[in-house]
Structure formats: C-alpha cells, structure tokens
Amino acid sequence: MADNDSPISAGDAGTVTLGDDLTVNRLGFGAMRITGQGILGAPDDPGNAIRVLRRAVELGVDFVDTADSYGPDVSEELIAAALAPYPDGLVIATKGGFLRDGTGSWLPDGRPEHLREACEGSLRRLQLDRIPLYQYHTPDPAVPLAESLGALIELRDEGKIAHIGLSNVSPEQVQEARVMTPIVSVQNRYNVDDRGSQAVLDLCDDIGVAFIPWWPVGGDTPGTGKGLDTVAARHGVSPVQVALAWQLARSPQMLPIPGTSSLDHLEENVAAAALRLTDDDLALLA
C-alpha cells in the first residue's frame, strides 16, 4: 500500500494479473540499478539502496523484479535485507540464465543443472520458500529451449517456484514454451525509441500474458526525437514520466519496471502512474 502521507501511488496505474493468482499494480520496480557500477558488485551506499526499496513499497509498488546476475547476487541480497519478511501481496520476481565474468559480459547459460543451481541460490538469497515468478533470463543458443524450460517445470512441480516467465524471446519462442507449460509473463526490451519487441507485445495482448518491458525509459534522457519534450511541456512533467505513461497506455498487459538508485527519481517514476496522455499526445509519440 502507498504511504498515506504521499499523494502518489503505483496503484494509480491500475493492475495486471500474472497467471491466475498474482494481481499487482502496473508500475513495478526493477532492481538492477541498485548494484555497483556496471551492474557488478555492491553499491557505494547499500543503505541508500535499502531505503529506495522500502520507499518503493511505501509508494504502492508491489512487484519487484531482479535477477541472480545483477551483482551477481547483490540485488537479491539487498532486496531481502530491505524487505524480508515480505509484506502480504508483494511479488518478488527473479531471473536465471545469465552468468557474469570479470569483464562485465553477460554469458547465456541455459543448462538445466545451471538453472536449478541458480534458482536454489535465489531462494536462499531472497529468503523465500517459493519464488512467485521465476523467469528464464535469455535463451541459450547452445541449449534447446525445451531442455531449459524443462528444468523450470521441474522446479515448479517441486514447489520452488510458483509461475514461469520468459525474457529476451521471440514470438515463436513464446509459443514453443506455451506448448510445454503456462507462461505468465514475457520480459523484453521495449521503450519509445526501441519497439523491436512490438510483435511480442501484440502476442502478449492476444494471449493475456503480462509484458514486462526492460529498459522502459531508454536512458536518463529518453527519446528526445519522439515528441517526449513537447508532451512533457504540455503536462508540466518530465520526459521520463511521459515515457512511462506512454508504455502504460500501449497495452493493459504492460508492467513497466523502471529502476533507479535515487529516492527522487523513484518518486518521479511512480508519479507517472497517474499521468494520462491524450489522443493528441499519443499521436505525437506514435
């Protein structure tokens, strides 16, 4: 629930349901940027990261997205430090399937044994008995999708995860996965400047699956050529807020997860939940 003293709330964005039992506000929090530079190691001020996470929940954010590769491990550890034991209704989603090396590279690893190890590590770090939403972070070209997904199905059947999601996938991969098991979410890159996953979003609309856009704003100064500044001036808000409101208007299945390590930016992001763009605004941003 939002802080009673705050005029802003993630609940102003409305809700979306993951599967048949997880209904969350349509503005979440992405916990990638609470780690160190390059998404490696701990932040300079872990206490600040904890304050940001707690403030997000105070503002009505009830969906927090992370991954074992953020840090690695650091984001999950900070989430548990800040929020465990978790309040009722707070959904923690994490991902597995990427490895990090000393250069900061992102290396796919979809081997079933790795995904099992990754999931069980996330359970320990997040201090959870069951992960509400576990997402396969990226398909591994060296491992058939069915083999990777089979590992997640086994983990679900063992009660270690509740729901399965996908990330960085094509429409064809979504459909392949759905033959094997229910998929409740898809997380792909999508923002005003990068609409390469439009076909995936359209599919999510058709089949009633939540679409979680990563990099939802597209950077600190998003889409300057897309009319964001003009629309922002009309409403007296920031281009970042317009970028988020544009996403919310694109689909009822949209669940943006803007991330930040700044309390001020967090409140700016959550305030976008109440911003309603006009038809003229949306035409300018088309």
Image (cartoon, helix red, strand yellow):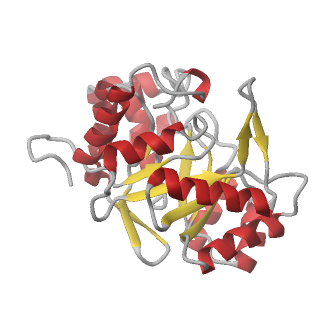
- In this view of the protein, which residue sits in the foreground, 225 or 152? 152
Q: Tell whether 265 sits left or right of 143.
A: left
Q: Can residue 233 be seen in this view?
A: yes
Residue located at (20% from left, 42% from top): 8
Residue located at (51% from left, 25% from top): 222
Instruction: Residue 161: give x, y in percent of width and height.
Output: 55, 69
Instruction: Residue 53: give x, y in percent of width and height.
Output: 34, 40
Locate the C terminus and report the quarter of the image it occupies. Answer: top right
Above or below 34: residue 64: below
Residue located at (64% from left, 42% from top): 195
Locate the N terminus and report the quarter of the image it occupies. Answer: bottom left
Q: Tell whether 54 sits left or right of 136.
A: left
- In this view of the protein, which residue sits in the foreground, 153 or 220? 153
User: Which quadrant of the structure image shows residue 38?
Assistant: top right
Q: Is residue 275 visible?
A: no
Instruction: Residue 20: give x, y in percent of width and height.
Output: 45, 78
User: Which quadrant of the structure image shows residue 71?
Assistant: top right
Instruction: Residue 189: give x, y in percent of width and height.
Output: 63, 43
